[in-house]
């Protein structure tokens, strides 16, 4: 079961959240995007109000099936972090169902081992959670991903930190009670085969892996644009929503248009494959 909100009118755009959040992370985008597009804000399987997969599964296969059966026509994809990888893999697996791609702070290209910075975030958070130090585990991830690195004032805005800390803890607790089943291997990430227009976004305070990935990826995609949003780390859509919204809406209007094809406003819909 995939839970989602459908808001707005125009050509469809599917939003895929980060692994630290659920579909509520896109609240700052609702008004700006729904003026031009039919927006599908999706909870990935195992997150938010979506059900847990019953067995081995594939996120991109689930999203491709959702687009085919629920959206009913090709959709642009906007993904953040973990969701950016899913958006890319969906386009690789089902190119006919995928319009332009907006890939935000994703680790899309990894030509070597994760940096010591990223490995430290993962290992310290896991060790703290396994030891019962839940507050510390969430704080490690908040510092590592939300605050980022090199920020003059060291931390992100308190409302941004509080949002991700709250939702991330909920996800940790859910996956602790109900571990996700095995995820099936994704497609080979042959970026040269992606024909859709691609917008790559990051923030200057993000981890080095993301910044390096985007610089590598922009040269490998046939039709890619890159933008860094000042004053942000891993989540520019929450830290700098005004600039993020303008940048991405303009990109989609250029490459996806705003022809009214599926009007409607529906909160809390469900999709059952």
Image (cartoon, helix red, strand yellow):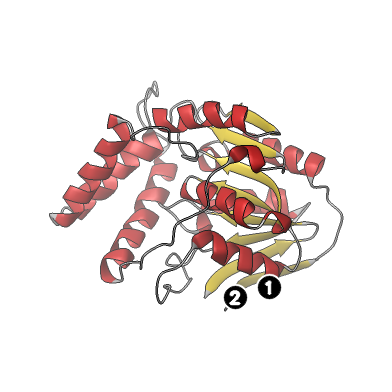
What residue does disc 1 label?
69
Q: Relative to residue 95, is residue 15 drawn left or right?
A: left
For the residue labelled by badge 1, is the local secondary structure a helix, a strand or a loop? Answer: helix
Q: Residues within 10 Å of mark 1 (few under 14, many from 20)?
A: few
Q: Residues within 10 Å of mark 2 (few under 14, many from 20)?
A: some
Q: Relative to residue 129, is residue 37 drawn left or right?
A: right
Name the mark on residue 271: 2
Q: Residue at x 61, y 27 (%)?
A: 219
Placement of 41 over or under 135, stated as above or below? below
Tell me whether the residue at label 2 lies in contact with that at label 1, contact meaning CB atoms closer than 8 angstroms: yes
Q: Relative to residue 176, is residue 185 drawn left or right?
A: right
Tell me which label, 2 or 1, sits earlier in the chain.
1
Q: Which of 112 and 4 lies nearest the eye of the viewer?
A: 112
Please identify, in this view, whether the residue under mark 2 or under mark 1 is nearer the observer: 1
Name the mark on residue 103: none
What percent of the width, then of the height, locates residue 220? Answer: 60, 31
Placement of 165 over or under 272, stated as above or below? above
- Residue 228, quarter of picture: top right
What percent of the width, then of the height, locates residue 15? Answer: 60, 55
For the residue labelled by badge 2, is the local secondary structure a helix, a strand or a loop? Answer: strand
Q: Residue at x 56, y 51 (%)?
A: 89
What percent of the width, then of the height, locates residue 56? Answer: 41, 69
Instruction: Pick out the residue farthest to the right.
Output: 259
Q: Residue at x 46, y 39 (%)?
A: 107
Q: Which of 49 and 178 lies nearest the eye of the viewer?
A: 178
Placement of 26 over or under 173, stated as above or below? above
On the question of residue 75 being in view, the answer is no
What percent of the width, then of the height, locates residue 197? Answer: 72, 40
């Amino acid at each position: 079961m995939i839970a989602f909100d459908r808001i707005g009118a125009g050509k469809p755009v599917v939003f895929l959240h980060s692994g630290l959040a659920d579909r509520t992370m896109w609240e700052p985008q609702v008004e700006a995007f729904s003026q031009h597009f039919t927006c599908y804000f999706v909870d990935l399987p195992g997150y938010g109000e979506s059900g847990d997969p019953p067995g081995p599964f594939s996120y991109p296969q689930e999203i491709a099936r959702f687009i085919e059966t629920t959206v009913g026509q090709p959709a642009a994809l906007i993904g953040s972090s973990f969701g950016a990888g899913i958006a890319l893999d969906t386009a690789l697996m089902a190119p006919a169902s995928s319009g332009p791609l907006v890939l935000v702070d994703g680790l899309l290209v990894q030509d070597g081992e994760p940096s010591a910075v990223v490995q430290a975030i993962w290992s310290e958070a896991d060790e703290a959670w396994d030891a019962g130090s839940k507050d510390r585990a969430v704080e490690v991830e908040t510092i590592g991903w939300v605050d980022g690195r090199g920020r003059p004032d060291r931390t992100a805005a308190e409302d941004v930190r509080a949002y991700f800390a709250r939702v991330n803890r909920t996800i940790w607790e859910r996956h602790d009670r109900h571990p996700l089943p095995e995820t099936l291997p994704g497609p080979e990430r042959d970026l040269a085969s992606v024909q859709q227009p691609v917008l790559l976004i990051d923030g200057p305070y993000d981890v080095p892996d993301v910044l390096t990935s985007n610089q590598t990826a922009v040269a490998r995609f046939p039709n890619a644009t890159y933008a860094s949003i000042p004053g942000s780390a891993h989540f520019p859509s929450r830290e700098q929503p005004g600039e993020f919204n303008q940048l991405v809406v303009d990109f989609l209007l250029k490459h996806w248009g705003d022809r009214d094809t599926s009007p409607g406003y529906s909160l809390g819909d469900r999709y059952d494959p």
